Image (tube, helix red, strand yellow):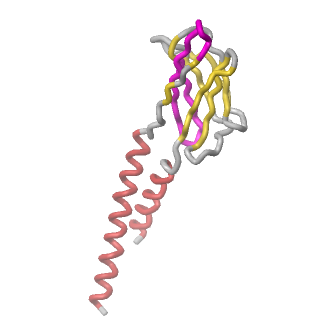
């Protein structure tokens, strides 16, 4: 019985990891690009660690900071190219958005990329589903055996 309960807890923990996703949206505001970070349910993600990477083959951090209480973060691109913005709320939610920027026209046309769950989260969910199935089978067999003894 303890083993079945342990498996059920693992299953629930795995499902909690993917309970809600993250959405990133970007739009130009003057010379800056404003990125808005929200949970899939619509609530803003305040205080998320934000990292902006410069375009090009070399991984170069342009700016780091935190989103405000409305889930917003702004940066000013210094050259044309595809800028990469990574948001991490510190609780397992991580998302990336690539923002193409045209320096001559001074505008960004965001290309959203949905956040993908990491490999560990996928494994936890898979193990959780298996755990629920085995726990259900265990309880069903225990009740069936108890009924046959009565």
Q: Specify start and end residues of the magenta stretch as a single range.
A: 83-107
Q: Residue furthest top?
A: 104
Q: Dividing the image into 4 quarters, which one contains the C terminus?
A: bottom left
Residue drawn at point x = 59 percent, y = 10 percent:
105
Q: Quadrant of the N terminus?
A: bottom left
State the residue lying farthest toward the right: 69
Q: Is 110 left, or right, of 28 in this rendering? A: left
33 part of magenta stretch: no
**Residue drawn where x is 59% and y is 38% of the image:** 90
Q: Residue at x 51, y 51 (%)?
A: 19
Quadrant position of residue 136: bottom left
The relative height of residue 124 versus residue 149 in the rendered view (above or below) is above
Residue 90 higher or lower than 136, as above or below: above
Q: Between residue 147 and residue 43, name the one nearer to us.
A: 43
Relative side of 80 to 75, left or right: left
Q: Residue at 33%, 78% (x, y): give it.
A: 142
The front one of 81 and 138 is 81
Q: Is residue 5 above or below residue 110?
A: below
**Total numbered labels:** 0
Relative image position of residue 121 (x, y in whole percent): 43, 45
Residue 22, x across and y down, in percent:
54, 40
Could you tell whether 94 is left or right of 144 in the image? right
**Residue 31: image location, x then y, percent:** 68, 15
Q: Judge by depth and name the residue closer to the eye, 64 or 6.
A: 64
Tell me if residue 84 is in the magenta stretch. yes
Quadrant location of residue 48? top right
Q: Main secondary structure of the magenta part?
A: strand
Furthest residue toward front: 105
User: In front here: 10 or 17?
Assistant: 17
């Amino acid at each position: 019985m303890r083993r079945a309960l342990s498996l059920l807890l693992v299953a629930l923990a795995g499902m909690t990891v993917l309970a809600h996703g993250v959405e990133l949206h970007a739009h130009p505001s003057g010379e800056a690009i404003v990125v808005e970070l929200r949970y899939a349910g619509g609530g803003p993600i305040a205080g998320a660690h934000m990292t902006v990477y410069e375009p090009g083959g070399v991984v170069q951090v342009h700016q780091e900071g935190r989103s405000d209480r409305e889930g917003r973060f702004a940066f000013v691109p210094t050259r044309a190219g595809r800028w990469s913005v990574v948001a991490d709320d510190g609780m397992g939610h991580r998302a990336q958005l690539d923002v193409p920027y045209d320096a001559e026209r001074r505008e960004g046309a965001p290309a959203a990329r949905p956040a993908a769950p990491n490999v560990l989260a996928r494994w936890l969910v898979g193990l959780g589903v298996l755990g629920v199935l085995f726990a259900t089978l265990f309880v069903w067999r225990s009740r069936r055996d108890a009924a046959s003894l009565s």
